[in-house]
Image (tube, grey):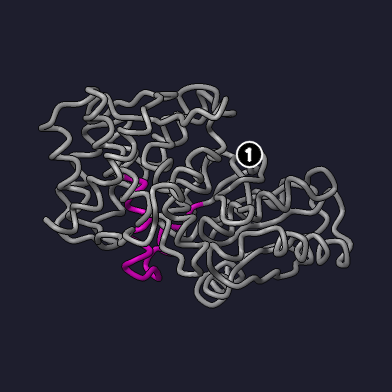
Amino acid sequence: MITILNENFSQLNDFLSSRSFSKIFILVDENTHEYCLPVLLGNLETDLAFEILEIEPGEEMKNIQTANQLWEILTEMQADRKALVINLGGGVITDMGGFIASTYKRGIQFINIPTTLLSICDASIGGKTGIDLMHYKNMVGTFTFPEQIFVYRKFLETLPYKELRSGFAEMLKHGLIADDKHWENLIHIQKLDFESVIPHIETSMEIKHSIVQQDFQEKSIRKTLNFGHTIGHAIESLYLSQGNPVLHGEAVAMGMITETYLSFAENLISEEDCTIIIENIQKYYPYLDISDFKDEDIFELLINDKKNTDSKINFSLLTGIGSCNFDHQCSRKKIASSIEFYRKLNDA
């Protein structure tokens, strides 16, 4: 259930009053503590006791050490199975907070209040929770739906441009895999900012929600949401392992370019569509320097991707603008050629 919050958060307050929670734990990072928590607390109407749990921002915090610290804090504060966790933040907070809640005492309830474009349109929707293992993305996690998702769009006004652009990559992905009109609307945005993105957010949310409703545990069509993420996650992981993390959307944009080229190499899309897609992604995203990453390092991560079976790399590839297939396996040679294609874009 996704609810767009009004100015006084009445829907959230109605939700809290309709349930019998024992206590509230609000998970934030340093940024959402400063910019978003005051708005939430200023509109929160409840007699329930609440505690603030704060972590440092960034993907590098999404690990078992942070999870263990949060479990220990919940234990020390005597959180019981009727406690509620409110995840107030971006993708790291909703991924980690959902994981913490879904595993603590075999599961306590949680809701997501996403604060970034990435988490509003993608990460908070769908019930995937998780943390990274070593430098492998989301390797440990659960499929657990939040009780509710509450969206307050004005939180986006506090976002730096790079964070807005990061989330926009997932919106472009939604158009490419499921809705050509959504893609067309997005690529005609001249200036990427809060005002230009707002009219298109609910469409992206609906696409993600619809796909998840059809296939919660990712046995079939939900796999199409991984377009751009197979190679993208590998590159994101390599940057993370160097202690130089890139934003998720930047890695996904790179992944969508390489996997669009791979779609063309597999004769699934025309050369014209391939060119149109890549040029429009390049319009919004800077080139990511992958010259330090060897193909062997990339393939090691690709082979360990959690979507694979029998050591075969499964891709979700485009079959047109607005359509996508899944469980598509490609030769190592073609995968390497798509990565090399991206490397050469910097020379163009």
Instruction: From the viewer's perspective, tell me whether residue 62 is left or right of residue 31.
Output: right
Residue 167 against residue 40 in the figure, above or below: above
Is 348 located above or below residue 280 in the figure?
Answer: below
Where is residue 235 drawn, in percent x and y? 41, 53
Instruction: Locate residue 49, reporting x and y percent.
Output: 79, 66
Q: Name the magenta segment's main secondary structure.
A: helix
> Secondary structure beneath disc 1?
loop
Please give the residue where the numbered disc 1 appears in the rendered image.
Answer: 145
- The x, y position of residue 34, in whole percent, is 54, 77
For residue 19, say whether it is visible: no
At a point 43% along the width and 40% down the height, the residue shown is 230
Q: How many labels does the image show?
A: 1
Nearer to the camera, 233 or 163: 233
Q: Which residue is drawn at 37% across and 43% down?
A: 202
Does residue 143 appear left or right of residue 241 in this picture?
right
- The image position of residue 201, as x and y in percent, is 35, 47
Q: State which quadrant residue 324 falls in.
A: top left
Mark 1 Cα within 10 Å, few/some/many (few <14, many 20+)? Answer: many
* x 37%, y 49%: residue: 252
Image quadrant in which the N terminus is located: top right
Residue 164 visible here:
yes
87 to the left or right of 210: right
Give whichever of 21, 219 is nearer the camera.
Answer: 219
In this image, 278 relative to 87: left or right? left
Q: Give the residue displayed 22% in from the left and 49% down from the top.
A: 281
Magenta highlight range: 151-171
Of residues 234 and 225, the one drawn nearer to the viewer in this rendering: 234
**Amino acid type indicated by mark 1:** Phe
Which quarter of the rendering shows the C terminus? Answer: bottom left
- Residue 158 in magenta stretch: yes
User: Is 295 contained in the magenta span?
Assistant: no
